[in-house]
Image (cartoon, grey):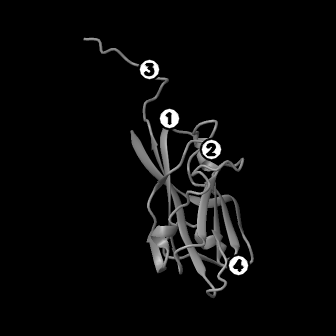
Amino acid sequence: MATATYFFDGNIGLTGASGWTDLTNSSNGNTANYAEGSNFSILTIEGTDAPTTGGTITQVRARIFGSNTNNFDFDTYIKTEADEFLNGGPTTLGPGDIGGLTSGAWGVYEILSAPTAGWSWDTLSKLKSTSKQGSGAPFGTREARVNRIEIEVTYSTFNPAMGHRKLLL
């Protein structure tokens, strides 16, 4: 088994509602800078830097590096290209871990359930993340920062084309 980490790079698309600034900072892989959103704004990053082929995928986890000036009203969901939720919809990445922080931190990894068709490297390369910052009213403006969203992939390195070889002495 091997493990590799990839990040949402926006190679398919990067969109943000008017409440988001510096969008490309959320998809450049650098945790030192960020995109910032407030009050009902949505940020969507489509595409990861994962390759389109590889070994058999056994597990995928995701986490976010960011901050949120409150402990709620900020959710990040991971979906397939066909908009199938992979972390169950209500299960989100890191709101409790990054809530109340004014500088960035890593949220905990969340295991993503496999899509209906199962995991493939092509599916991984086309994942999309949607981050939504909720309303600040009546508590004033709330800001969320997304520095990086990443996936950790566990996969087998066994090559089925090689089969099981018998050692001849």
Identify the disc placed on residue 123. Answer: 2
The residue mark sitting in front, 4 or 1, is 4
Residue 44 horizontal side relative to residue 145, left or right? right
As helix, strand or loop, the secondary structure at mark 1 comes to loop
Does label 2 or label 4 sit earlier along the sequence? 4
Q: Residue at x 53, y 61 (%)?
A: 93
Q: Residue at x 53, y 66 (%)?
A: 148
Residue farthest along the front direction in this orientation: 138
Residue 135 horizontal side relative to residue 148, left or right? right
Residue farthest along the bottom direction in this orientation: 140
The residue mark sitting in front, 3 or 2, is 2
Identity, as a three-letter code, of the amino acid under mark 2: Thr
Residue beneath disc 1: 56
Residue beneath disc 4: 19
The residues bearing labels 2 and 4 have C-alpha atoms spaced at a distance of: 29 Å
The residues bearing labels 3 and 2 have C-alpha atoms spaced at a distance of: 26 Å
| Vertical position of residue 5 compared to residue 64: above or below | above
As helix, strand or loop, the secondary structure at mark 2 comes to helix
Q: In the rendered image, which quarter is residue 154 located in?
A: top left
Foreground residue among 155 and 141:
141
Foreground residue among 83 and 140:
140
The residue mark sitting in front, 3 or 4, is 4
The x and y percentages for residue 50 are 56, 50
Identity, as a three-letter code, of the amino acid under mark 1: Thr
Q: Residues within 10 Å of mark 3 (few under 14, many from 20)?
A: few
The residue mark sitting in front, 3 or 1, is 1
Identify the disc placed on residue 163. Answer: 3
Q: Residues within 10 Å of mark 4 (few under 14, many from 20)?
A: some
Identity, as a three-letter code, of the amino acid under mark 3: Gly
Does label 3 or label 2 sit earlier along the sequence? 2
Q: Residues within 10 Å of mark 2 (few under 14, many from 20)?
A: many
